[in-house]
């Protein structure tokens, strides 16, 4: 069984980190993982996307054209990648920045205003953590407690912002349950 | 040791440290700059030195200097940077100095692009610089192998007293995968006293060592080339490494592929298997020495009707494959090298076209 998740947004939104944390948690759970960034001449404010592959066997090609799920953090990302998602997958939509939903009817759409939730939790910069935990709660790809530990570990060197990210994580999980 | 999740470039840097490399000289170039970014922080912690050269030409000779002094030394670069270093690599080979070069290949020729490619196969395996020399070249297919090969490269560079290259590509450098580091390389550089210009005060031998590549006497030059040739012969006997995937089946087609491209082929082979079509892959892990005998034997299996070399190039390794198959089977080629890695579905179409 192999699952592929594409995270997409603009540079600076922290999608590479969200993707890395998901891959890290999956690795700790015993899966084979690969984290593949798009690396072009991108810059802050430009597009950024990244694919995580999670598998119970050795991963062959890590280059994925049609991912199982998509996490879209801004409108261009949704427009660019929504048609690539495999039927039955999840399309996660950051409704704080995306005023529309996907035209796809063969996928599950998870619509969460992650920027607004992050601002309420203390800072818009935690939006990527809200998206990560909301998506993880819906997709059930990894254990949520383990993922939360991974987030905490990631910010170990910046202890000041751990409470913010823990709050963001919890609010993300909650939003997935009510969305 | 537990698995860690690391980018290929960073993992290569850490592997060098664990192999006892205390000297790293480099000049930044995409897609491998993270190696330098990692080592500029880590090397001083280990008592090592990172120095950024003013160009890759300078870096090549910084490597030569450290290698000539018998120090464990590495540089990393990407295609155009390796071209600039090739003159020094030729000198290093001629002077029998151990050094490790990592080429995280990007598209060429010229400045090309920054996306993954395998267009430097000729440059890596056939010399690159002037004169009769080879590098021992290893090609990892992921982050784990990149680590293992980087550490092994130091051992082999010292065993053969010559330059060893790791040929990766942009994807191997940029991708994160779980990695488990082997035990640290505990050995000291071997036979240093016999040849290295390490300073008379620092070694037991009182012999005056000389590191040089100039041999004006025809007999001496011929002897040096014979000594190099003997090393390459020994590599062919002792260092050939490869993997045969799905080779125990009655496969109808044999793919030859390496590095990132081989992973796509692996997925294509698994998908074809589900359709009842058996295909095998011979993946060289050492590009020089090339697995000549293994390619010949795998191609000559009764069930095998054709061989195809699949590369992110316009057809380079295929020339070695043709040489090894010796006309016993038709040898085809498929390659792309703009930076987009062909999909498993594309490979499947190509294979089906051969059946």
Image (cartoon, coloured by chain):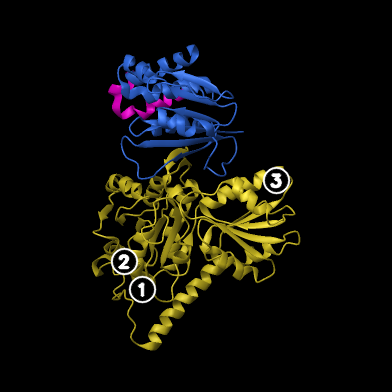
Q: Chain of mark 3?
A: B
Q: Which mark is residue B273?
A: 3
How many numbered tags mark residues here?
Answer: 3
Chain A hue? blue
Q: Is residue B274 above or below residue A14?
A: below
Magenta stretch secondary structure, dominant:
helix
Residue A152 lies within the magenta run? yes
Residue B245 lies within the magenta run? no
Among numbered discs 1 and 3, the one appearing first in the sequence? 1
The magenta stretch is A146-163
Q: Is residue B304 above or below residue A119?
A: below
Q: Is B100 displayed left or right of B198 in the figure?
A: right
Chain B hue? yellow
Q: Secondary structure at mark 3?
A: helix
Residue under label 1, please give it: B95
Q: CA distance from mark 2 to mark 3?
A: 49 Å
Q: CA distance from mark 2 to mark 1?
A: 9 Å
Q: Classify mark 3: residues with Cα within 10 Å, few (<14), some (14-19) or many (20+).
A: some
Q: Quadrant of residue A163?
A: top left
């Amino acid at each position: 069984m192999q699952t592929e998740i594409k995270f997409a947004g603009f540079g600076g939104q922290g999608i590479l980190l969200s993707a890395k944390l998901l891959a890290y948690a999956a690795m700790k759970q015993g899966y084979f993982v690969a984290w593949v960034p798009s690396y072009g001449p991108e810059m802050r404010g430009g597009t950024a996307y990244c694919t995580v592959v999670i598998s119970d066997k050795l991963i062959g090609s890590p280059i994925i054209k049609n991912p199982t799920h998509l996490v879209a953090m801004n409108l261009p990302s949704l427009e660019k990648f929504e048609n690539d998602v495999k039927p039955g997958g999840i399309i996660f939509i950051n409704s704080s920045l995306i005023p529309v939903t996907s035209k796809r009817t063969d996928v599950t759409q998870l619509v969460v205003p992650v920027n607004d939730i992050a601002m309420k939790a203390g800072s818009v910069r935690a939006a990527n953590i809200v998206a990560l935990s909301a998506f993880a709660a819906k997709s059930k790809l990894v254990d949520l407690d383990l993922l939360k530990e991974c987030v905490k570990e990631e910010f170990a060197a910046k202890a000041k912002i751990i409470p913010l990210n823990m709050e963001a994580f919890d609010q993300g999980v909650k939003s997935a349950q009510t969305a | 040791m537990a698995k860690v999740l690391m980018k290929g470039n960073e993992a290569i840097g850490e592997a060098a440290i664990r192999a006892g490399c205390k000297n790293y000289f480099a000049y930044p170039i995409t897609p491998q700059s993270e190696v330098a970014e990692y080592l500029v922080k880590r090397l001083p912690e280990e008592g090592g030195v990172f120095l950024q050269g003013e160009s890759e030409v300078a870096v090549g000779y910084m490597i030569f200097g450290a290698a000539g002094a018998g120090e464990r030394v590495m540089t990393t670069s990407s295609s155009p940077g390796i071209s600039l270093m090739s003159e020094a690599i030729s000198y290093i080979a001629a002077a029998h100095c151990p050094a490790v070069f990592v080429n995280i290949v990007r598209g060429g020729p010229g400045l090309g692009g920054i996306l993954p490619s395998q267009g430097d196969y000729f440059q890596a395996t056939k010399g690159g610089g002037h004169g009769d020399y080879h590098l021992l070249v290893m090609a990892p297919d992921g982050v784990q192998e990149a680590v293992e090969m980087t550490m092994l490269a130091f051992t082999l560079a010292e065993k053969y007293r010559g330059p060893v290259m790791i040929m990766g590509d942009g994807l191997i450098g940029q991708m994160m995968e779980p990695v488990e580091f082997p035990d640290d390389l505990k050995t000291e550089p071997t036979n240093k006293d016999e040849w290295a210009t390490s300073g008379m005060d620092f070694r037991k031998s009182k012999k005056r060592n000389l590191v040089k590549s100039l041999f004006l006497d025809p007999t001496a030059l011929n002897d040096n080339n014979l000594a190099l040739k003997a090393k390459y012969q020994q590599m062919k006997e002792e260092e050939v490494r490869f993997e045969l995937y799905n080779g125990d089946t009655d496969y109808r087609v044999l793919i030859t592929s390496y590095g990132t491209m081989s992973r796509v082929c692996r997925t294509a082979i698994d998908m074809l298997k589900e359709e009842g079509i058996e295909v095998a892959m011979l993946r060289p892990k050492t590009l020089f020495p090339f697995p000549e005998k293994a390619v010949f034997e795998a191609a000559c299996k009764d069930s095998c009707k054709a061989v195809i070399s699949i590369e992110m190039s316009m057809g380079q390794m295929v020339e070695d494959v043709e040489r090894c198959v010796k006309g016993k089977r038709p040898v085809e080629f498929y390659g792309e090298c703009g930076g987009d890695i062909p999909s498993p579905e594309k490979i499947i179409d190509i294979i089906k076209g051969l059946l």
